[in-house]
Structures are given as structure tokens and as C-alpha cells.
Image (cartoon, rainbow, N blue to C red):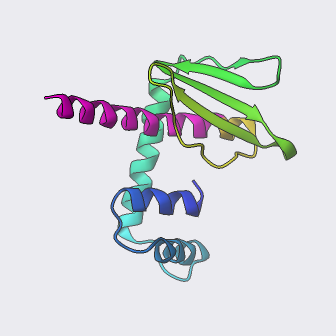
Amino acid sequence: MTPIELASRLKTWGDHRSYDAIIRSIQRMLSGDTGVSGEIKVIVNMLTYLQHLEDEQNTALQWIQMPSGSYTGKAGDFMLTLTPQSKGRWLISIVHQPSGYSHPWPSWQNDLDSAKRKALFCLGDARRHIFEWQRDERLRST
């Protein structure tokens, strides 16, 4: 996860600071100007755990190489696509097939293995988003 991705995640999870302040804080921790806060240690451990859960939940995921050079895989109701880009980078697309929801694309990854890991991590976010959307729809209909 890049500092920008971590800052976005913190903002989404309710960090009250401005986006610029969050980025500065992360950059200071990365450069060693300040120590890593206890909160960030907890968040990084939680993100590592979420990645582990996605890896475990998707052990049967088969990546199929397409003639175009892209790779696709199906995980439940989601179709994951890894598309090669210039300079060896990979673009990740995650689509919830029943609803057509396309999860926001993460930053390009520098190699195929990184793209596969990032796709699985983002898959967890997409699943949570669909769950929350479905829950909100049920609440509106009652």
C-alpha cells in the first residue's frame, strides 16, 4: 500500500485530519523523522490480517491468461482482470457481475505478482462495499 492509498484508507475510516496532514504524518514516519504511532501499528496489523483472510478465502482462484495477455479470475460474484500496461505495469479491474458495480481501480502495480496480491486485497474492499450497499437497500425497503 502506498502512502497515498493508506491516507485514503485512513480518511475513509474516519480520520478527522485533512488529507494533506495525514500524508505528511505518514511521510514523516517513513523517513524516520517521527516514530510509528501505535494507531498506525494497529492499522497495519489489521490490514495485514485482512490480506491474509483474502488470501485464505481465495486459495482456489484460478488466473487464466487471455490471448490479449491479460489475466482473469472469478471469485464468487466478482470478475477480476489484470491488464498489462506500458513499462511492465498492470491495471486491476474488479467487477461485481450481478450488479455491474466496478470497484475503484487501485494504482497500477509494477509486476504481475503484485497485481494479483493487490487484486485480492481490493476484492475484500469490493465485497464490503457490496455488503454495505445491499444492507442499505434492505433498510430503505423496510
Q: Residue at x 70, y 45 (%)?
A: 109
Residue projecting furthest to the bottom: 33
Q: Nearer the viewer, residue 84 or 117?
A: 84
Q: Nearer the viewer, residue 100 or 43?
A: 100
Vertical placement of residue 111 versus 32, above or below: above
Q: Residue at x 57, y 62 (%)?
A: 4
The dominant secondary structure in magenta is: helix
Q: Start and end of the magenta stretch? A: 116-142
State the image coordinates of residue 75 (x, y, percent, origin top left): 51, 20
How many numbered markers are drawn? 0
Vertical placement of residue 137 versus 64, above or below: below
Residue projecting furthest to the right: 87
State the image coordinates of residue 51 (x, y, percent, origin top left): 48, 40
Vertical placement of residue 123 versus 19, above or below: above
Quarter occupied by the C terminus? top left
Q: Residue at x 78, y 43 (%)?
A: 89
Left or right of 71 in this view: 3 = left
State the image coordinates of residue 19 (x, y, percent, origin top left): 48, 70
Is 126 a magenta residue?
yes
State the image coordinates of residue 17 (x, y, percent, origin top left): 39, 74
Q: Residue at x 46, y 18 (%)?
A: 76
Q: Quadrant of residue 71?
A: top right
Left or right of 127 in this view: 27 = right
Residue projecting furthest to the left: 142
